[in-house]
Amino acid sequence: MIDAIIKLKDRILGRGDAAITIPVFDGALKPNNLLEDAEIFASLDATQDLATDGKHLFVADGARVLRYEAATAHELHHFEQPVTALACLPDGGIAVALAGREVRIVGGTYDGTRWDAADGSAFNAVNAISVSSEGTLLVTDGSTEQPTNNWKNDLMGLGSTGRVFELTLRNGAIRTLATGMAYAFGACSVNGTTWVSESWRHRVMSVNAGERPTPVTDSLPGYPSRLFAASGGGVWLTCFILRTQLVEFVLREHPFRKRMIQEIEPQYWIAPALNSGNTFLEPMQGAHLKMMGVVKPWAPPRSYGLIIRLNEQGEILYSMHSRFDGKNHGVTAAVECQGHLYVLAKGRPTILRLSIADAERSLKI
Amino acid sequence: MTNTSVTPILELRLATKNYAGVPAIEEIDFSLTPGEIHAIVGENGAGKSTLTKVMAGVVNLSSGQMLINGEEVNPRTPSEALALGVAMVFQETSLVPTMTVAQNLFLGQERYFNRLRGIYIEAQQFMQSLQFDVDPTAVVSLLGAAKKQMVEIARAVLHNAKVIIFDEPTASLTPEEKKYFFDLVIALKARGVSVIFISHAIEEALQISDRITILRDGKRVVTDEKVNFDRSRIVQTMVGRDLSKTHYGQRKTTVRPQGKRVLSVQNLRMAAMVKNNSLSVFAGQITGVFGLVGSGRTETFKVVAGIIKRDFMHGGEVILNDKPVRYFVPAPAVRDGIAYVTEDRKLEGFFETKSIADNIYLGLLAKIRSARTFVSRKDADQSGEHWIKRLNIRAISKDVKAIELSGGNQQKVVIAKSLIQEPQLIIFDEPTRGVDVGAIAEIHQLINQLADEGKAVVVISSYLPEVMSLSDRILVQSMGKVVEEYSALDATEEKIMYAAIH
């Protein structure tokens, strides 16, 4: 009862959960054009994920897994279903998620090992796999209600059915690390703990079985996605879409939101997108106006490109951006290989490459 | 240029003023010729304010003589001094806060029957003639520091004084307002009015004055024509020590890395002053906040510290250590580790009739949740002595009343009062306003030390060299919100000013 009164008060006064506020891009998140200026490494139509064995870049493109040697791609495997997540194993094999519903090991010691359910519930939207420091697989299942491609439906439907699992290669055991996450999208092992992106709550959580999840970094201005270990300690965190006050407002206006989901095509929803500016039918954002024929880079973006470098304490060291007026948007994966950062900008779609040393030099890090 | 053979309009001979037997000024000879602009410069506690207060009748000489137009006078009160043609514009404004600008202007000159409309029109015309953009109907308490200063200046001019003493007149003025002020001083000089000008900005003294008197430790060191001075000679004479080791005015070559985000202000609104303002403050760094007067810098951080409230509805969020907070009074903010060092120390910074030790100890009491029936005199004395030593507060003893201290030492008391609370976020609002060069260096050193200790430090300043020499990152605020952010390595005065005015 008291909770209901507080919620009503907050809703009337625009406070608490009803406060439509967004953290600002400042400090280490100050916008730059590093991502926009990055070199295009490859342009592929259906790329879903990137991985590396430390020497080569591996790309999940549609139902194929490609391995790059220098700039030349070799098809490593072809599957019957699209690959939605990819990871390289220390023994030379790879782990793939097929259509989000099955995790399979290909090559290496555990070739052929499969998982398709946990705790009696089938996988539905496996969107990231990584190898932990103990050699287990960390897997995030974004939603039990929506497939991976329908992430927008999950966001606007206020989904919170994401799960995180630990798969043991040796015996095929599955351990549930967390459930009820508002879209789990990416996990990584950092100093023996598991960090997970909880996209719709704009944070990275530290989850360990039997313990209550705790935030590693909170109040991000974007929706975080995959995590990848960085060579100097800490992680690379990608943000595939950005928060805006307009979307935050719609997420709180439940009758409007529900009617929008029912009556309008998803591409025209007032919702974030992996890319934008393709049609005049797209919803306008606040201040999203052309001045002298140019949309200003500080206009609230419907799509954006952002990579955040976190240290081992979860503090933001620096960030790389493709701003509103850029093209390299919808970043869903970033892997570090041989001193370069390979970035999957799904909005374009393209794989970008940039020198980490050059980027840090330009940021005076 | 002045002609020294002319009878001085105001003269002091062997002027001495003792406080509790200790001389604040000692055997000072001073003269002011008609139409002269005379700058008095000196270090923190050098006796500048005491000297000018003697002239303005605020304090009385212990020994020595004061002469006006060659005749010995002894003004006991400011009104007596004013009758003799000497007016003083104080460093800390002495306006009546609950009265309007026009009422303050004509205070003491009221007729038997006063018509407000007539007073307002007269005040409006007068303010316009001075090119001061101040609404005469505005209540003074609602004005910013710069506008209060303008009213003070206007009042002195209105009283037709022959000698006007300005104590740190430009400390709270923007560059544009300073230009108007200098034009005004030059116009006063042209009318034959003599001006005594106390400033810590040495460039201003060099720019505007005809002669400069330098005081040190209550004694006059030198009086000379402006042309015989340059900045380094003034500084050397003022402090008698090497200030080259300070960072004041120098560009930063390295910046501290950003630590944990301690404060996140999101879409904050506060009446017409703060409009959808968002910013972050990080541990282990000095975040400089620059903006012109009225840009909402002070108001933003006063909301953070619980001194004023944000808008009742849709006022945005203040997030401290990842938790939303909303303070209705400062006490819980103090308990949560937020300290705000005010820009207006006389009004909000300390109890002027209480001792240094009591003032500092009150800072600690503000943090303690439960009310204490008995206050430990011993604790208060110990903490007073500790902070006097640590911040190098120059006073005869810890029992000296705060009002008897010079501006710089008063500021140190205000800082000590905040630091005793062991805050994690310290907001300095104009930390060196009305503080001399020597004390500026000490305060800057202290601010740097706090950041090195890992505390999140915010420095709000209207003085660009201060922002640039202290800050690791600089936020520029304009029209109620942060409009630009620079790393100290990338910032230039031009860039910052451009962002602030566009």
Image: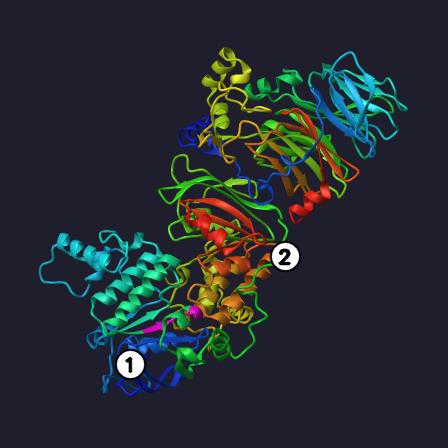
Q: Residues within 10 Å of mark 2 (few under 14, many from 20)?
A: few
Residue beneath label 2, please? B254
Q: Residue furthest left?
A: B113
User: Which secondary structure lies at badge 2?
Assistant: loop
- Residue visible at 57% across and 65% down? B247
Q: Can residue B449 be found in the magenta stretch?
A: no
Please say whether residue B197 is one of the residues in the magenta stretch: yes
Mark 2 or mark 1: name the one nearer the start of the chain. 1
**Front-most of residues B182 and B311:** B182
User: Residue B442, image x and y in percent?
Assistant: 53, 68
Q: What amino acid is at disc 2?
A: Thr
Q: Position of residue B265 (x, y in %)?
A: 49, 42
Q: Which residues are magenta?
A: B196-203
Query: What colour scheme has been applied to the protein in the rendered image?
Result: rainbow
Residue type at tag 1: Thr
Residue B104 placement: quadrant:
bottom left
Q: Picture coordinates of residue A174 (x, y %)?
A: 79, 22
Nearer the observer, disc 2 or disc 1?
1
Q: Is residue B325 above or below residue B31?
A: above
Q: Residue furthest right?
A: A109
Q: Mark 1 falls on what kind of element?
A: loop
Q: Is residue B17 above or below residue A92?
A: below
Question: Disc 1 is attached to a residue of which chain?
Answer: B
* Residue annotated with mark 1: B33
